[in-house]
Every structure is written in C-alpha cells, then in structure tokens.
Image: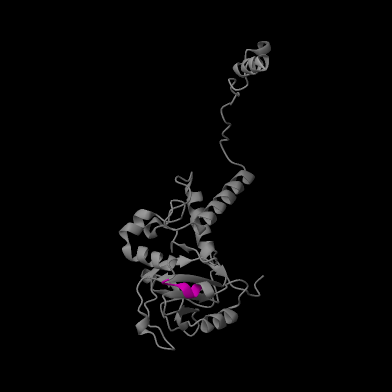
Amino acid sequence: MLRFLWIVILVITGTCYGTSSPLKKLPTFQEPYCPANLNKTEQSNQHYQLAIKVYKASQADPFSPNSLWNHGYLESHPKVKRALTEFLEGKRGQALKAINLTNKTPHSLHQDLIAAGFTWKEVALSAGRAKFWQLDGSKTSDPNSPTGVKMQIYIHKDGSMVRIKSRGIPDDSGHYPQRAPQVIQAVLIEFDPDQCTQDHCPYNTDYFNEAFKVTAEGSAVPKSPSPRFGFKPPVETLPSSRLQKFAGDVLMSLVHTELKTDCR
C-alpha cells in the first residue's frame, strides 16, 4: 500500500521515471494570423454570426444586459420604460399575442385582427418630408391622391397597434431595405381605453407615440435601429460601419414581417 501511494506521488510531481508532468507543461500557443482583408466567405460568416446574436438578443428579457435595449435610454424615457414593463406584466399590448403573422395575406390578417377586437383606419403611406407614395413609385405632397399608396392601421384598446402595408414600398431604385408587402406590430405610449367605442379607438398613431415594436414571436424591441431610440447592438464595438448598419437591418427584418403574396 505504501509503495502504491509513493508511485502516485512520484507521477503527480513529475519525478517518476524521469518524465515531466503534463500539468506543468504549457502548450505552444502562437500569435493569431490576422488577415488584412476578409474574403467573401469570411465576410458572410461575420454577417451570419452577427444576425444570430441580434436574434438571440431580441429574445432576451429587455431589462437584462443581453438584450437590444440601452438601459440608460430607458431610465431617461420613463414612459417607454413603463410601457415595456406593463407589456411584460401582461397589462398592455396583449392583443398582439393572439395574432399569428405566419403565411398571412392582407385579407386573412384583416379578418384575424377584427376578430381579436381591433378597429382600423386607412391613411396615406408616408414617403418622408411631407411626401406620400404613389402606386407607380413616384411621390406626391397630396395625402388624398386617388393614386396614392394606402396603409391600414389597426388599433386595440389595450394599446396594441398593427400596420399593414399591402402594397409594400414601390421603390424601384432599391433604396428602401424593406420593400415587400409587410406587417408591423407595435405598442403605444399614450392610450386611454375609455376613448374607444365598438368601431373606433381615436388613439394617436404617430411615430413619436410608438413605445416599441414587437417581433412576430412576441418580443419587445426598440422601434428603430438607432441609439436615439434605445437600440444597443449585441456587440459592444462593431469593427465597421458596414456591420453596424447590418445589425440594424437585422433588427428591422425581425419587426417587418412579409405578407403572403404572388410576388415569389
């Protein structure tokens, strides 16, 4: 027994049979090779990995450090923070959870929204700077143009909001990243259920009254890919403006769900 213990001690200390302990020997870690320029596959991998990180962060608790939310922004915008808290507590925007956006046409989604208690209105689709989209892709300053693109806005008395853009964005130049017919879900900041009738909820649906957007999977995320609205990329420092823009594009793809059409 004593001989066995002595052999074990020799092996552990590295003195047995003149060998050195593998625990004391360090691997030969060499300095990394850092390519001056990434090839196309490496660039694609960068984008894939970042997309995965944005998606995972979108599903995290908004108040956790792993989320897409800048917590300093939430502290300085208490109304947005309150809306977010009430959404998580089931006190606001819960009608959205009953809506399934998968494989929906504008008509089938309209029926689902009405059945869920939403009311709706139709407005001209803004093209920015007091301009509105025309069906042919041009822009007009007349929101009542008979050839203008229409958007439907659905409101629920619990502060849920859904926008349907059945035409999409008719931009042949390709400038707009989200042109396909689409649906967007959001939750409002200010709303009062007592204002609603059976056929109408006169809530303010302007962009500044939107607290946050909601993904098709029901996650609350910043309404814009900008720090001005609380967006925090899932990587502290992105190596290029190209990747910073890509992170924002991924966020927007999560909240602009394509509608079922005959396009493709």
How many numbered marks does the figure carry? 0
Q: Is residue 242 magenta?
A: no
- Any magenta on residue 93? yes
Residue plotted at (49% across, 71% down):
185
Q: Where is residue 218 in the image (x, y as percent from the top left)?
A: 51, 66
Start and end of the magenta stretch? 91-96
For the C terminus, the image quarter is bottom right
The answer to which quarter of the image holds residue 89 is bottom left
Can residue 72 be seen by looking at this rendering? yes
Tell me which corner region of the image, top left, top right, bottom left or bottom right, holds residue 141.
bottom left
Q: How is the image coloured?
A: one colour
**Given the current orientation, which residue lies at the most extreme top position?**
18
| Quadrant of the image containing the N terminus | top right
Q: Would you say residue 19 is visible in this rendering?
A: no
How far across and how far down the image is residue 220, in percent?
A: 46, 64
The one of 143 and 185 positioned closer to us in this rendering:
185
Q: Which residue lies furthest to the bottom in this view?
A: 198
- On screen, 249 above or below 142? above
| Residue sticking out furthest to the front | 1
90 or 93, which lies in front?
A: 90
Q: Tell me if residue 224 comes above or below residue 136 in the rendering.
A: above
Front-lying residue, 47 or 77: 77
> Which residue is located at x 66 percent, y 13 percent?
16
> Foreground residue, 5 or 120?
5
Residue at 39% x, 56% y is 227
